[in-house]
Image (cartoon, rainbow, N blue to C red):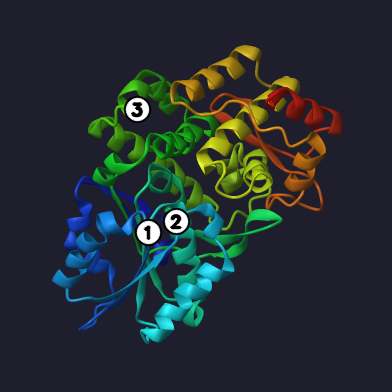
Amino acid sequence: MRRLMVDLGERSYPILIGSGLLLQTQELGAALPQSKHPRVAIVSNETVAPLYLAALQASLTSVGADNTPLILADGEQHKTWESINAIHGAMLTARCDRNTTVIALGGGVIGDLAGFAAATYQRGVAFIQIPTTLLSQVDSSVGGKTGINHARGKNMIGAFWQPKLVLADTAVLQTLSAREFSSGLAEVIKYGLIRDLPFLEWLERNLDALMARDAEALAYAIERSCSNKAQVVADDEMETAKDGGRALLNLGHTFGHAIETGMGYGQWLHGEAVAAGTMMAAELSRRLGWIGEADVARIRAIYQRVSLPVLAPTLGASRYLELMSHDKKNIDGKLRLVLLRQVGDAVTFSDASQADLMATIETCCET
């Protein structure tokens, strides 16, 4: 088992990475309130629950915890107020009190929903992340961002609410579809592009092993990704840094969220949209003279090796710009993008010209 810490003072918490951790009752029990009969509300979905809910319930029973499961529909299109109300309703029906711990058992959608429900139920209850997709293990489960989507933009409503524990069981990744697995690799690759060039070089040498889901390669990639995110979150938890900081984790996300919103939530997986969005960010960085065509080609080749899209859907440049105008990073009405000063070194930038933006979008969309 690999162990990392997210250093947030009194709110610090561990990230555990390893195979078979769903049965690791010692760490799970330690994260629950130390009461005679701790209460747990498990939030999962119709895809994950049949695979892993029973194992989690057995682990909770072994540490004396009562549990109430709530199974939601699967998919990004269900990251809504209706799902939050369903979670709150189930917890109220079960008479969950402030000593209840909410456990998210699922991917990024479940983690965001369960975390937001935990942040708002009786003004905040404890929360544990058990991510079951590669994307959620390396990104969304760490850092405390929770929330839901709105018709005008992704993740526009939510709260910062840190978990007590992140338990990443690598064994569950074997049941992921090829498409979901590739989607997760987009967030792994991101860390190399924004701040960890040696990791990007390691990825280029080991992408075949990762695509084969080699256990050792996977554990290392997850640990390195989580280590990068933990450092960024510790330095800028609430994403308040004016330059850089936590915002750098959003490379490709401004374009990517426009893809997800514009196409309809769930049509493109998050990692697919991030990959296409990162190609747009790379192209704009090239137009600004920061990176060269060889760098853009290098990034494109990495995504192609892991079966991720390198062209965005054609929504129209004006539609992209309208959707991007709702991005959470924007300040004083100015579009704030994460771009590449060089490969391995990202920067926030608010002065892109309309002409460069339009040309970038037109160049990077499907014909």
The kind of residue tagged 3 is: Met
Helix, strand or loop under label 1: loop
Q: Are marks 1 and 2 in contact (CB under 8 Å)?
A: yes
Q: Is residue 287 left or right of residue 91?
A: right
Q: Position of residue 349 (x, y in %)?
A: 72, 37
Residue 211 bears which disc, if any?
3
The kind of residue tagged 1 is: Glu
Sooner in the amino-acid sequence: mark 1 or mark 2 = 1
Q: Kindly identify which residue carries mark 1.
A: 46
Q: Position of residue 96 (x, y in %)?
A: 37, 83
Q: Nearer the viewer, residue 71 or 206?
A: 71
Q: Crowding at label 3, few (<14), some or many (≥20) Cα neighbours within 10 Å?
A: some
Q: Nearer the viewer, residue 167 or 81?
A: 81
Q: Is residue 57 above or below residue 46?
A: below
* Mark pair 3, 1: CA separation: 26 Å
Q: Is residue 75 left or right of residue 15?
A: right
Q: Going 66% across and 31% down the picture, which residue do you hit?
A: 281
Q: Kindly identify which residue carries mark 2.
A: 74
Look at discs 3 and 2 and give the one toward the viewer.
2
Look at discs 3 and 1 and give the one toward the viewer.
1
* Mark pair 3, 2: CA separation: 24 Å
Q: Going 46% across and 37% down the picture, which residue do you hit?
A: 183
